[in-house]
Amino acid sequence: MIDIFKDLSLLNQHIKVIMINSSGKKEGGSDVNGIFRDALSAFWTLFKDSCTIREDERIPVIRLAYQAPGWEGIARIHVKDYDHL
C-alpha cells in the first residue's frame, strides 16, 4: 500500500480496493468505503506492529527500509484515511 501511495495524485482519486484472503482468493462484497476501511485498518495494524516502538504511546521509528518517498506514502495514507471519516 505504501508503494501505491507514493503517487501524489491518489489523494484526489477514488480508490477501489479488492481484498485477497489467505487462500489467495478475492473476497466478496462491494466497496462503499467498507472494504477500503478494512484495508486501512489492516494497514495501520501492520504499521503499528512493525514500524513503532513503546507500548502505551506508539512512536514511529525511522527504518532504513523506508526512505523519504515511503514516509510520504505513509503520510498520504493517513490523509486519505482522515478524508474517509
Image (spheres, helix red, strand yellow):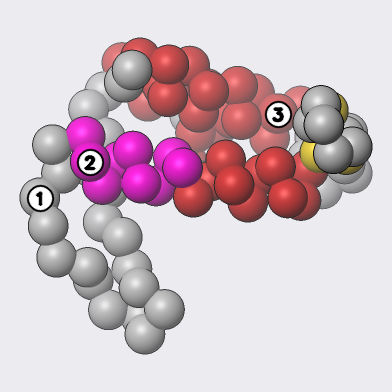
Relative depth, front residue between 56 and 71: 56
Mark found first going from the N terminus, 2 or 3: 2
The residue at which mark 2 appears reads as 34
Relative depth, front residue between 20 and 70: 20
Label annotation for residue 30: 1
Tag count: 3
The residue at which mark 3 appears reads as 71
What amino acid does circle 1 point to?
Ser
Label annotation for residue 56: none
Mark found first going from the N terminus, 3 or 1: 1
Tag 1 and tag 2, C-beta contact below 8 Å: yes
> Would you say the magenta stretch is mainly helix, strand or loop?
helix
Question: How crowded is the residue under tag 3: few (<14 C-alpha within 10 Å), some, or many (20+)?
Answer: some
Which quarter of the picture shows residue 82?
top left
What amino acid does circle 2 point to?
Gly
Distance from Cα at disc 2 to Cα at disc 3: 25 Å
